[in-house]
Amino acid sequence: MLNGIEKTETKALEPLIYDLGSPGRIGVNLPDCDVPESDLPRDLMRDDLKLPEVGELQVVRHFLKLSQLNYAIDKGFYPLGSCTMKYNPKLNEDMARLPGFAALHPLTDGEGTQGALALMHELQRWLGEISGFEAVSLAPAAGAQGEFAGILMIRNYHLDRGDTQRTKIIVPNSAHGTNPATVTMAGFEVIEVPSDNRGDVDLEALRKVCNDRGSEIAGMMITVPSTLGLFEEHILDVIEMVHRVGGLMYMDGANMNALMGIVKPGELGFDVMHYNLHKTFSTPHGGGGPGSGPVGVNAKLKPFLPGPIVEIIEPAQAEDETPLYGLVMPEKTIGRLKAFHGNFGMHVRAYAYIRIYGDTGIRDVSRHAVLNANYIRARLVDTYTIPYPRYCGHEFVLEGRFADAPDVHALDISKRLMDYGIHPPTNYFPLIVPEALLIEPTETETKETLDEFIEAMKRIAHEAKTQPELLHDAPHSAPVKRLDEVKAARDLVLCCAPALPNAAGD
Amino acid sequence: MGYIPHTEVERQQMLAAIGVTTIEDLFEAVPASHRFPRLKLPKPMSEMEVAAEMLALSESNEHGQDFAIFRGAGAYHHFIPSAVNHLLLRGEFYTAYTPYQPEISQGTLQAVFEYQSMMCALTGMDAANASHYDGATSLAEAVTVALQVTRKRSKIILSPTVHPQYREVVRTYHQGRNIEIVGDEKPQELAALLNLIDDKTAMIAVQYPNFFGQIEDLRTIAEKAHAAGALLVVVANPLALGMLKSPGELGADIVVGDGQPLGVPMGFGGPYVGFFATKQEFVRRIAGRIVGETVDKDGRRAYVMTLRPREQDIKREKASSNICTNQGLMALAVCIYLSLMGKNGLRKVAELNYHKAHYAANSIDKISGYQVNRDKPFFNEFVVKCPRPIAEINEALIEDGIVGGYDLGKDYPHLANHMLLCVTEMNGKDEIDALVKMLEGLK
């Protein structure tokens, strides 16, 4: 800084809330104490608390400005593969905020929670019906926690039968990172199996694993359609092979948006799967949660479900009456995954969503999700390398690289898409495709939006060859340029100095 | 119809571009024997019908707008300023995902950074993550960190006065690991608990204030734990930290808890937000997302998810946790709430809770047959020994529009006929007096 002129490029986009305050300012009108005051425990009281001191309007402006630095579904196309960034209906938000749901204490006595429990009971039933499972627990807080629950159920199923030798879970190399991480968390070891040249599980490799180590196999985790967006062509063989050696089959339901009304995983022979309500059932992603990851199981695993689940405690006495619902811990439950009964606010939203679509509409969701993905795929097949030449599910992967533009990477294409006002696809996943870009449009996007995206992708392919620096320097129009991620990891500034326990200036 | 915008003309154009005649042709890889099953679901409904049905369902619940709530036990009825909800409803916040692309996610990233800063300030720690699912899973993840930090140690001590459901979750999470979880098998005083600490102990977890609302002497526990090379993990009520000394100041190594009291509705138990804060030396061991400060190519200050190589999508089976999605929007709610309250507002709310709870306790203690436990100082919850089964008392109270205290006999058999009452800034003097009057009639 010279002559009081700050270099413009070091100026922050928006000050930290800590830098906006003034001592003594407060952003809320609080009541006076209406009871006689008691003595405060002086020796237990803190001296200072380093929170911001700002007014209500400042708070509103600050967070509104921050919101404007974000990209979001409500702003534009968000084809982030494996995340199912579909429209989050506004009705759902209103329903979740009804006082009868939002202001309901989780430990309210049974009679006073019948509306909430009826909703959960219906949702359990509907989710079970959609995927062909006997029972569902809504307890898991996110997909990853649903996976964890599923693998723990498999573990306890074997242990309950006295089968203690099964310590391995098979995971294809195309799997989400959560799958192998879940296996480790549950105390198992991963056996990875490769994919074949059509993107399916390599059946010969799987057969060999099952033959050689069958008695050690507790089960297999597989995503359907796979993370490549492909429906496993030999799924019945895969399931049969693992079942034959005594393993159970776990389906990662992250890609359920391709399957509703198309096929029921439970009928294919899967023993357990998780749903992502924040993907398939339209609950918002919230900038990184909350999610909700219910698990569905067949009769074999029902006693092991995470609790509590909702059951009918007393059947209805007459046709026009309602039964009495209650929260129940299943007989051999793997236990509780979080306090209380799951992310109920997400259950409310998913309920509203399924209610709108109903029996006929739910199938249309998956039909159109798959139509949209295949449309983009067909229109880009001449411009980009698409490694697996077959119809895709709700998403597909292409290679973000060109033989005649060797310096351009998938990341550059992603960053350049931001200049076209589009959120990038998922980068570098699945790991088995070089320079992968995983594209998932979802069913709620119009043909015009898809056409704009296709046009942008074609123009970027052209730019890659004619003006590669345009891509390397992208984004040009985002609030900030590419970030120094090495500096972030090296310096580790994880909170602002005024908040630290013994910050300078104390 | 739902939310699908396609017209028949567009569908046909798209199918032609793909080179098929019907959408059904795209599913040839699905086994024909199982393709297109019938779904036994209800018929589609209009928006207004769904809204009416759900309003009716919600109104059959005994909720905080119609009832006076004196129940806490891990979920609390607090005032939430209107601005919190209005800002959460910005589509730019709630319809975004995890900020993988920092150039177009600075809003979420900076808000998380501010949230992390506020959690550090409250807990007296150096670093906090972007959140866990709830307080219970934060505690379970703290166990993982403690086991890693202390290497080869395998004993975890849980105080019996940590929330019963939190302790259940710790056991669920770690059932596949070969570790020993002790301390809460029976009711025992802190001194007895401290005697369990030995050279195998990775950590001891206590709650502050504890499940019974009481404030325990953290300093003694910290000294004892540290002398044996174990960590002290504190499960804290963050609103209480608006007035109480921070656990960091008293010697905690990891502070976890649920941020629900800070701007998140009770919502029948979720979504809430688990906070996790620790010392800088342990930060590379913690699970979940962490946002750090950096600069962009032009030198402009900006924020990004950092220490990513710890996470499941990169480290796969070697990651210490599988967490990816966390409770981002609820962390934002906490951040906005704490911004509005500021240090003076939070202190005032905390003190209102304290004074009202003590007014209620003093009044109830005077009723013959009722006895308030006053062994230790308490914040906004306290234990009352009652002359009748708690279920009976609560049945009577609900008739008068009062959701009474939590029945402790459910989790602590020796505390049958004991109720855990919670009083917050939401309970006016008239409500408290009505509760006292009702109890007087229930001897």
Image (cartoon, coloured by chain):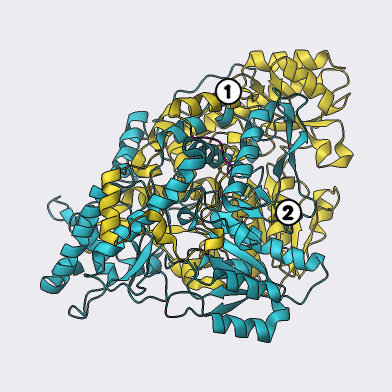
Label 1: how many Cα within 10 Å (few below 14, some 14–19, many 20+): few
The amino acid type found where label 2 is placed reads Lys
Q: Residue at x 88, y 24 (%)?
A: B388
Any mark on residue B56, and which? 1
Q: Which chain is cyan?
A: A
When the figure is inspected, residue A366 is found, relative to residue A404, above or below; the finding is: above
Task: Depth check: give the residue in front, A22 or B91.
Answer: B91
Does A190 lie within the magenta span? no
Image quadrant holding the C terminus of chain B, namely top right
When the figure is inspected, residue B316 is found, relative to residue B293, above or below; the finding is: below
Which residue range is magenta in the image? Answer: B40-44
Does B43 lie within the magenta span? yes
Any mark on residue B379, and which? none
Indicate the position of residue A279 as horizontal and vertical percent values: 46, 51
Any mark on residue A302, and which? 2
Task: Depth check: give the residue in front, A187 or A356.
Answer: A356
Image quadrant holding the N terminus of chain B, namely top left
Q: Which chain is yellow?
A: B
Q: Residue B4: which quarter of the image? A: top left
Q: Mark 2 falls on what kind of element?
A: helix
Indicate the position of residue A306 as horizontal and vertical percent values: 69, 52
Residue A460 visible: yes
